[in-house]
Image (cartoon, rainbow, N blue to C red):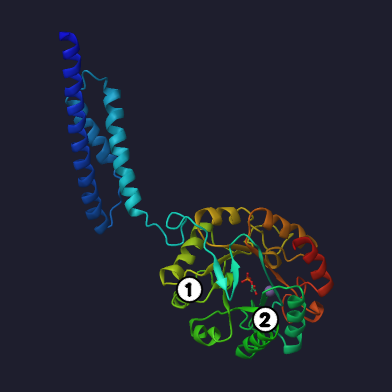
């Protein structure tokens, strides 16, 4: 009986000490937060390994019995690590586009057509708007298929200033007219902050191209609208940089962001770019945004576009972008990679 009481009372004491330790640990944690705040303000890093070993040394000097020095070291090391985790968590700003901020998939409603709800959307159209007749033929084809989008560049970011630069506002008007005629949502690229207001009149979806993936001023300006934006990954932008660039749009208030993997630059020459297929599931895991794959600019090769389309859909892409032209051989841009209507039919059979 007496021994039982002793066990009980010892256990009670240990439990009280646990409570005491917890109280001290919490107090310590709050001090760590306060300290980190000061460090952050003065631009100092959270972790200071020299300071950590000094603290351990100071503790061990006081003797460790009944623990082994290594045991004591382990106990304190785990306290230090936990503190570091508190600091890391505080310093790591959780992005608005992150899955951590919003667990559910974002669905983007473009005049009744939803992107990101599990049904892939197709965005076809010529590389560039060249004439009303050209876009009209594509529009007719797409509407016959029951498609909901048409793309076409009017403000083209061309490699050479001597190449066709696009029809500008006139091209956007053509796209809009055709879109209205066939009940198709229009998508076209803008390349400058000064175009946002003007282009918004003609477009259902803004496109930001690979060359402007880190044009933060443009992203901020588009972020101030609430128009859906097809936001392409830059050709040398890594996934983290891409996600942070998308955050510029979201941070300015526009959450209607559709990500688009369009291939990155590597040493490989067999394709125009190297499609980073892993980016699709990674972007879908790390963000809540829909992700589509541009099978035209990523490959630059008609012969593998069908296979790439299947791969993209298999890894969970929410849609595809692909260039189609009534007569690619006379196209004013990307002549080699745009599908003619027969090639379109063949691809369409594969993907729909
Ligand atoms: C485009 O889609 O018209 C285009 C120029 O693509 P990217 O920005 O991916 O090169
Ligand atoms: Mn193109």
Q: Circle 1 sits on which residue?
A: 219
Q: Is mark 1 within 8 Å of ligand 1?
A: no
Q: Circle 2 sits on which residue?
A: 183
Residue 32 visible, this angle: yes
Q: Nearer the viewer, residue 209 or 199?
A: 199
In the picture shown, does residue 42 fall above or below 327? above
Outermost residue on the right side: it is: 342
- Which quadrant of the structure image shows residue 120? bottom right
Q: Position of residue 27 (x, y in %)?
A: 19, 42
| SS under mark 2 | loop
Total of numbered circles in the picture? 2
Q: Is residue 327 found left or right of 212 in the rendered image?
A: right
Q: Position of residue 247 (x, y in %)?
A: 45, 65
The quadrant in which the C terminus is found is bottom right
Q: Is residue 297 found left or right of 137 in the rendered image?
A: left
Outermost residue on the bottom side: it is: 170
Residue 230 visible, this angle: no
The quadrant in which the N terminus is found is top left
- Of badges 2 and 1, the one in the foreground is 2
Residue drawn at x 55%, y 85% is 199
Question: Marks 2/1: CA distance?
Answer: 28 Å
């Amino acid at each position: 009986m007496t021994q039982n009481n002793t066990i009980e009372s010892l256990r009670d004491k240990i439990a009280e000490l646990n409570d005491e330790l917890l109280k001290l640990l919490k107090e310590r944690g709050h001090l760590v937060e306060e300290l980190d705040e000061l460090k952050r303000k003065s631009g100092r890093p959270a972790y200071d390994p020299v300071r950590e070993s000094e603290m351990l040394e100071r503790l061990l000097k006081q003797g460790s019995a009944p623990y082994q020095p290594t045991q004591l070291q382990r106990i304190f090391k785990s306290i230090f690590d936990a503190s570091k985790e508190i600091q890391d968590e505080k310093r790591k700003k959780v992005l608005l586009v992150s899955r951590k901020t919003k667990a559910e998939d974002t669905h983007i409603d473009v005049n009744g057509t939803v992107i990101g709800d599990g049904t892939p959307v197709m965005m076809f159209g010529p590389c560039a708007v060249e004439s009303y007749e050209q876009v009209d033929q594509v529009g007719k084809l797409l509407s016959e298929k029951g498609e909901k989008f048409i793309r076409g560049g009017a403000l083209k970011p061309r490699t050479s200033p001597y190449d066709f630069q696009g029809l500008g506002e006139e091209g956007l008007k053509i796209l809009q007219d055709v879109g209205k005629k066939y009940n198709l949502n229009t998508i076209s690229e803008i390349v400058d902050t000064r175009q946002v207001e003007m282009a918004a009149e003609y477009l259902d979806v803004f496109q930001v191209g690979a060359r402007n993936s880190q044009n933060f001023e443009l992203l901020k300006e588009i972020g101030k609208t609430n128009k859906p934006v097809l936001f392409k990954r830059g050709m040398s932008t890594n996934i983290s940089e891409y996600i942070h660039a998308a955050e510029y749009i979201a941070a300015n208030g526009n959450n209607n962001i559709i990500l688009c993997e369009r291939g990155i630059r590597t040493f490989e020459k067999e394709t125009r770019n190297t499609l980073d297929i892993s980016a699709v599931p990674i972007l879908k895991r790390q963000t809540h945004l829909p992700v589509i794959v541009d099978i035209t600019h990523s490959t630059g090769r008609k012969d593998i576009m069908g296979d790439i389309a299947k791969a993209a859909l298999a890894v969970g892409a929410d849609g595809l972008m692909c260039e189609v032209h009534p007569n690619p051989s006379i196209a004013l841009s990307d002549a080699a990679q745009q599908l003619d209507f027969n090639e379109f039919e063949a691809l369409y059979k594969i993907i729909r």
